[in-house]
Amino acid sequence: MERILIVDDDNTINTMLKEALEREGFSCGQAYSGSEAVLRLSMEHYDLVLLDLALPGMNGEDVLRVIREKGGLPVIVVSAKDDLDSKVDVLSIGADDYVTKPFEIKEVVARIRVQLRKSGGVQPQNQLTCGGLTIDREHFAVTAAGREVPKLTRQEFRILELLMQHPTRVFSKDAIFEYAWQEPYIGETKTLDVHISNLRKKLKQVSDEEYIETVWGIGYRLKA
């Protein structure tokens, strides 16, 4: 499931976009200022950013520059600025697309899908292999060091799937929870921690390797 960060200080627009995109099958994070967006991007995985320009504190142009310094994450600017110069300026510093407010949500969704296709998005592979682990999405099965892992719950499977898709990335607990449960994270960590513990125990039954690493104060990642 592709994960999108919505950056807009207007709570109504931010919430409307989140609800609409989640109906389309995306997972969404929200930020209401430029500095919050940069912080979330440093701690969590996203496949695309919807970025307003008129943000409190750090403006959208500066957020875009920070994103471009770190890589090629797709960014679609969604702004009330409709003059040609504004569009050209933002595209010249690295925006992938520009949508003017007010907008039709169908157009935003279509533009998101175009950018995700260009960037590759989450690969729709039936099998995923990383670090001695293999996930078979079609048969809902996992092997570790060539041995089949005892049957995982749906959430355990999705936790492992997310970590394997981006093996060098540290995922925050809320990002993992929202991916695995496909619902908003409300700050309760015990449920996720129990599932991580159970997942580790099942992996231990077939291999002595430690596959999941705890990054204290942040979350988890696949151990290199």
Image (tube, rainbow, N blue to C red):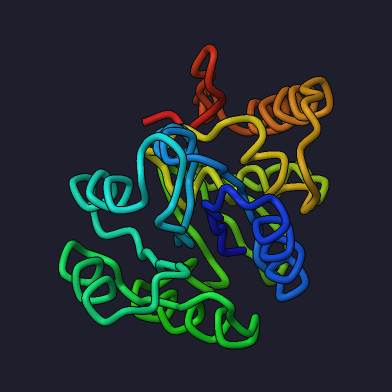
> Compared to 142, does 92 lie above or below?
below
The answer to whether 6 appears left or right of 60 in the picture is: right
- Which residue is nearer to you in this view: 163 or 72? 72
- Which residue is nearer to you in this view: 224 or 168? 168
The image quarter containing residue 108 is: bottom right
> Compared to 141, does 160 lie above or below?
above
> Compared to 204, does 96 lie above or below?
below
Image location of residue 184, percent across then percent down: 78, 45
| Residue in view at x 77 percent, y 26 percent | 187
| Residue in view at x 53 percent, y 75 percent | 101
Image location of residue 152, percent across then percent down: 78, 45
> Compared to 6, does 202 lie above or below?
above
| Residue in view at x 72 percent, y 39 percent | 177
For the C terminus, which image quadrant?
Answer: top left
- Which residue is nearer to you in this view: 195 or 218? 218
For the N terminus, which image quadrant?
Answer: bottom right
Image location of residue 180, percent across then percent down: 72, 47
The image quarter containing residue 107 is: bottom right
| Residue in view at x 55 percent, y 53 percent | 8
Image location of residue 98, percent across then percent down: 38, 76
The image quarter containing residue 95 is: bottom left
- Which residue is nearer to you in this view: 43 or 125? 43
How many numbered callouts?
0
